[in-house]
Image: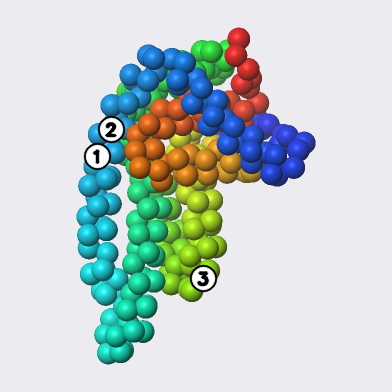
Amino acid sequence: MNAPRLAAPVVGAVGRFLSGAGLLLRGIGLYVRSPGLMLLGVLPALISGALFVAAFATLVYFVDDLAALVTPFADDWSATPRGLVRVIAGPAFLGLGGLLAVVTFTAVTLVIGDPFYEKISERVEERYGGTPGAVEVSFWASLRRSIADSVRLVAISALVGIPLFAAGFLPVVGQTVVPVIGAAVGGWFLSLELVGAPFYRRGMRLPDRRSLLKADRPTTLGFGVAVFVCFLIPLGAVLVMPAAVAGATLLARRSLGQSIEER
């Protein structure tokens, strides 16, 4: 489907990045001012959050064993260099696990809470003039489409995460540059995932939203990185997820050239 394209704002990339982060703040404001939205948004994130905390705790518990498993070449080394390479491998595993957890948390939570977050997104759109070009999609069709696109995004993020995991072994670079790249990659995929509901409501699929968000990549990254950082905070994902859905609705409307000023 051909979609209208919104020209990128005539400001610098840094300004557009900050503007994208500001959309999350606006989403938080909408969420905090609407007790009904808060009740809709908390339950799915709590369920998903409990599952992912348990999974990440398991990864932390076994990280030393995993580090030894991927560095068999160091088995015959003396204790100091063997310990050093495995100390580097451990954070690399945790970094990969964190990246995948943040991206898959969004996918799983959106699947669990699909009707809840759809309602949040609808209510946000109503505040800003409704949904031009809305199409009727049954719940089961919407759920199947959401799962299919989520699986595709998770698979792509895993493929991107593997090279980042390998780069995590590099001294200094693996502990400085790689986390920044990881946040940017994770933020991009989070944005693509979170804008799903308003695009589905208009009969548009993953290729459509990818194309439109690329038109103003700094804004998209600003929003996504802000969400990514919030999700790394303990319980941040549980608390921020509904507000992120609200902010993503604003991002989608902006990318489609529609008003993001309350009426």
Give the mark count: 3
Counting residues from the N terminus, which is met first, the one under dot 3 or under dot 1?
1
Residue 13 position in % (x across, y down) = 70, 44
Q: Where 120 falls versus 213 (above or below)?
A: above
Q: Closer to us: mark 2 or mark 3?
A: 3
Q: Are marks 1 and 2 in contact (CB under 8 Å)?
A: yes
Residue 71 position in % (x across, y down) = 31, 78
What's the distance in space between the residues labelled 3 and 1, CA to CA? 33 Å
Task: Tell me what residue is drawn at x 29 percent, y 39 percent.
Answer: 49
Q: Closer to us: mark 3 or mark 1?
A: 3
- 223 with respect to 196 (left or right): right
Q: Helix or strand or loop: what does disc 2 sit on? A: helix
Instruction: Please give the residue where the numbered disc 2 appears in the rendered image.
Output: 46
What's the distance in space between the residues labelled 2 and 3, CA to CA? 36 Å
Q: Residues within 10 Å of mark 2 (few under 14, many from 20)?
A: some
Instruction: Please give the residue where the numbered disc 1 appears in the rendered image.
Output: 50
Name which residue type carries label 3: Val
Task: Tell me what residue is drawn at x 28 percent, y 45 percent.
Answer: 52
Task: Tell me what residue is drawn at x 41 percent, y 46 percent.
Answer: 232
Instruction: Please give the residue where the numbered disc 3 appears in the rendered image.
Output: 172
